[in-house]
Amino acid sequence: MQKAIPILLSLMLVAPALALNDSGWVEIYAPAVSQTEEGMVGALSTMRIRVEPGSGHVFVDTFPLTQIDMQSSARMAASVACSVSNKSLSDYDFFVVVRGEAQMIGGTSAGGAMTVAMVSALNDLPLRKDVMMTGTISPDGSIGPVSGIPEKMEAARDAGAKVFLLPEGQAEYSYTITSTTQIGPLVITSQRPAEMNLIEHGKSLGLTVKEVSNIREAVKEFTGVELKQPSAGSIDMSEYNKLMKEHAEGLENEARASYATAQSMSAPNDYLNESRNRLVDGINQLSQRRYYTAASSFFESMVYSSYVVNYNKYRADPEKGIEEIGDEIERIESKIKNEAEEYNIVYLQCFGAAEERIMEAEENFEIAYNLLQNSSIADGIFALSYAAERANSAEWWFDIAKKMHGGEKLSEEYVSSLALSAMDTAEETSIYAQFSASSELLSLLLQANDELNRAKDAVNMSYMAGAVVLASKALALSELVIELGARGMSNESLSITKENARNAIARAQSSGINPILALAYFESAESYESTDIAQSLIDYKYAECIARMSGAP
């Protein structure tokens, strides 16, 4: 797989478009916002886009030079344009040339308009000359909020626009009025909030203002063509249910036995209670055929039971615990590294889950070792117990992978290339997400960066399938930051995110890949829908991005 090397731009744009010219370029006038001595004003630039058969590159030439904060916007626009056009980004190269009358103010507002223009170029759809728009672009195609809209509207009017598109929910526009008053030698600056109805403001400028929520709506306004989302079909859960049911039932037996052993030993009641509560929850989930959710509860139950057992066994001799559990983790690590002769496209995700979990086991073993070396016996043995059970869960996923048959064999070189490409995409999206992350979403962005760093560690440890899974999770979290920045955390967001995950899984299955790990996260997300919308959104995004990064050449 050839790794795309995007060269990207930073520009706050809104764009009416001209029809395709004879040379195959789409030319777009771009009203923007520029800083002057009199304050923020509208300015005009021109953007020309061309699409050719290629390898997924995005080349941008811009003058005057612009700020760095939209360096991923062009790549995001190309990705979304291909998605809504039902085309593969890896089959095309995108060329964007931007020229402006003045230095533009940086921002991500070019995303929506740039995507529309790329859709035009991909599908040979002439664009209306009298339509312009502003709005960021999200990975799922939703249009996000922007600033400086009144100034952009004025620039659009001056460029001949009759229709102006803005993000849904921004017709009632909030802004700040700054005023200065001189009292003797002092200049006092004050600010006050204000609101403007942009539909009415548009009428005063001779513009018809319309809100759009996603790129398909924007394309329809520009072209008159409705890009319908193709149905990916239903999800086939049969193989997943068979594998995970057997897996969960085996874990139930282990969790019951572990709890029974812990009951016979002296321990604080809170640990036994935690073990029992999670055991009961797992049994309830199993009765509802939520097999992965049940397995997760059984895993948690065994962590608490194992702590009770290990505390009684090792508190007087922690070094023995380090040696015995360390040997077991090493055995499982060797099994995962040595017994898989070749990567297989069918079980790549399960194998990646195993590698991810053995990494986590090793990380917690190191934590346990340091705690025990510093005489933090209780905390150290708990971390040791977690490491042991996490290693066991790695072995479970490895055994599930080995039960899956068929599918194309993948070379180690191909999986390495897939991992590096996934990491590049995740890092690029994380940069883009930084400029739309509110304080409420900052924790998700930090979590995305943590997962990306773990993916890099996985590559260094030669856990390439694990790196694919970790990079997919990093990508999912960054994309979620962008999408929630556009839509907010709501039932509507949950519905859209769920449908995107369902479609991604169905597409993977239609290509001959059964994404078991993605199905596991999809099931987990469903179990959280009524109790924890944030966790449900995260798990649906995990399902979507892992399904998309399925390993198909």
Image: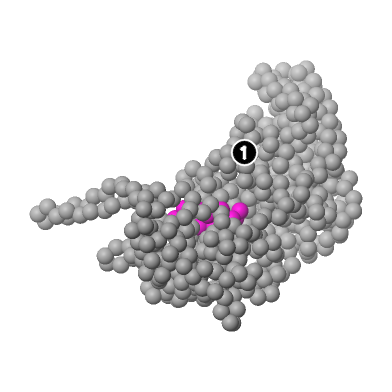
The range drawn in magenta is 136-146
Q: Give the residue furthest to the left.
A: 184
Depth check, front residue: 393 or 462: 393
* The N terminus sits in image quarter: bottom right
Does residue 277 appear in the picture of this structure? yes
Reply yes or no: does residue 142 show up in magenta.
yes
Residue indicated by mark 1: 535
- 343 or 461: nearer the viewer: 343
The kind of secondary structure element at disc 1 is: helix
Front one among 271 and 285 = 285
Residue extending farthest to the bottom is 23
Which amino acid, by three-letter code, is at mark 1?
Answer: Gln
Residue 384 highlighted magenta (yes or no): no
Task: Identify the residue shown where x is 11% and y is 56%.
Answer: 185
User: Which image quarter: residue 24?
Assistant: bottom right
Residue 206 left/right relative to 279:
left
- Residue 62 location, x and y as percent? 48, 74
Residue found at x 58% / y 43%: 493
Please provide percent x and percent y for residue 297. Answer: 72, 31
What residue is drawn where x is 53% and y is 61%?
221
Say which quadrant the C terminus sits in. Answer: bottom right
On the image, the x and y values in percent for residue 246 come to 86, 35
Q: Say whether residue 354 is visible.
A: no
